[in-house]
Amino acid sequence: MDSCVCAALAARDYNAAAVHVSYGQRTEQRERQSFLAICERLGIHDKLVVRNEALRAIGGSALTDERIAVPESHEAGHGVPVTYVPFRNAHFLAVAVSWAETLGAGKVYIGAVEPDSSGYPDCRPAYYKAFNEVVKAGTKEGQIEVVTPLIAMRKAEIVRLGLELGAPFDLTWSCYSREDQACGVCDSCVLRLRAFEAAGARDPIPYAVQNV
């Protein structure tokens, strides 16, 4: 959902290109399907789809290791949850920055969000400030900037912005565990459902359970 709104912002303001990284996550097929459909709806024609084998091989996350159960939202507890994929966004950004350098692009948009991020450490503003220093030092011209337009927003604010932009929420997928219909009970589903409710809007995707 956040990536979709971010893509809608980029497509509004620039001739956008889009990257999708599959990394062996439980909903890999469904997320790739969403990526392609969102790009088509937003008129983004330049696309890069890659697969990262490292994150599944490394494991350590309920999203990439079938032996670790995806908890329901009320079971998540405190601290960084088991759905955190270790240092995942660095892998995504490395691909995006490499491609941006090849394309001659000046900005890399990522839909990272801190307030409703489930406590993931790679969704903090300090992380992106530091990453931009790496990009500056490690690219030919040092001019590519990673931008995080949603990072300080609550999920409900993101829903409202997406509705204003005409972001295709009906094509998005947030569920951590299912591909046929969203489970409605994992942390990602619950955060999303609460956001739509707070924004006074209906979430257009199907849910197996919807108790929010």
Image (cartoon, rainbow, N blue to C red):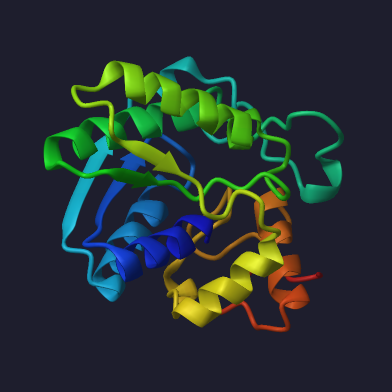
- Image location (x, y in percent) of residue 85: 56, 29
- Image location (x, y in percent) of residue 138: 29, 17
- Image location (x, y in percent) of residue 124: 64, 35
Residue 182, quarter of the rendered image: bottom right
Of 109 and 195, nearer the camera is 109
Of 30 and 13, nearer the camera is 13
- Image location (x, y in percent) of residue 121: 65, 29
Of 125 and 167, nearer the camera is 125
Please state, as top left, top right, bottom left or bottom right, where the C terminus lies in the image. bottom right
Q: Is residue 27 above or below residue 138?
A: below
Residue at image x 30%, y 37%? 96
Q: Is residue 84 above or below residue 72?
A: above
Q: Is residue 172 above or below residue 88?
A: below
Of 164 and 116, nearer the camera is 164
Residue at image x 78%, y 49%? 73
Q: Is residue 155 above or below residue 204?
A: above
Residue at image x 33%, y 53%? 32
Residue 80, quarter of the rendered image: top right
